[in-house]
Image (cartoon, rainbow, N blue to C red):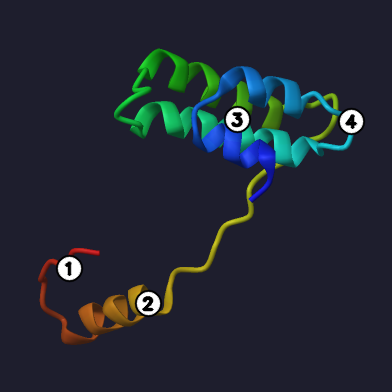
Amino acid sequence: MTPLQCAAERARPSVVEILAARPEVSRAQAIEAFELLGASFANDKEYYNLGLAYQYLQKAMAMRYDTRYGLLLKKPRRPHTRLRQLERDYYSRGKYCVYFY
């Protein structure tokens, strides 16, 4: 885990801002750090603040969709093997039952 990710995970916005502005930090790394920072403010018991969570998630989204540098979209991930197996079982039975993932 990089220092930038550690600062974002521990909800330290001033440190994240300073580290994200450094030239050796790529745009993708900065965006991921701001997303993690926003998620940290939304989930942390001690630093819970939905206003800051929204602010940093919005900043990350604005950076991700900035057309001056080109869009930097996330790549979709494949579902986990277990999830695919549950879906296959669900549809093969032909019954409607609920699976909790």
Q: Tag 4's secondary structure?
A: loop
Q: CA distance from mark 1 to mark 4?
A: 47 Å
In primary-sequence order, the first of circles 1 and 3 is 3
Q: Of circles 4 and 2, which is in front?
A: 4
In primary-sequence order, the first of circles 4 and 2 is 4
Q: Is residue 87 left or right of residue 19?
A: left
Q: What residue lies at 45% left-to-right and 34% top-to-bottom? A: 39
User: Label 3 belongs to which residue?
Assistant: 34
Quadrant containing the C terminus is bottom left
User: Which residue ends up furthest to the right in the rendered image?
Assistant: 23
Q: CA distance from mark 1 to mark 3?
A: 33 Å
Given residues 67 and 44, the one toward you in this image is: 44
Q: Tag 2's secondary structure?
A: helix
Residue 19 lies, in percent from the top left, at: 74, 28
Asked if marks 1 and 2 touch (Cβ < 8 Å), the reply is no
Q: Of circles 4 and 3, which is in front?
A: 4
Q: CA distance from mark 4 to mark 2?
A: 41 Å
Q: CA distance from mark 4 to mark 3?
A: 16 Å
Q: What residue lies at 51% left-to-right and 37% top-to-bottom? A: 9
Residue 25 lies, in percent from the top left, at: 81, 37
User: Label 2 belongs to which residue?
Assistant: 84
Q: Tag 1's secondary structure?
A: loop
User: Label 4 belongs to which residue?
Assistant: 23
Q: Is residue 50 left or right of residue 68?
A: left
In primary-sequence order, the first of circles 4 and 3 is 4
In primary-sequence order, the first of circles 2 and 3 is 3
Q: Which mark is residue 99?
A: 1
Amino acid type of the residue that numbered disc 2 sits on in the rendered structure: Arg
Q: CA distance from mark 1 to mark 2?
A: 12 Å
Residue 91 lies, in percent from the top left, at: 24, 79
In primary-sequence order, the first of circles 1 and 4 is 4
Q: Of circles 1 and 3, which is in front?
A: 3
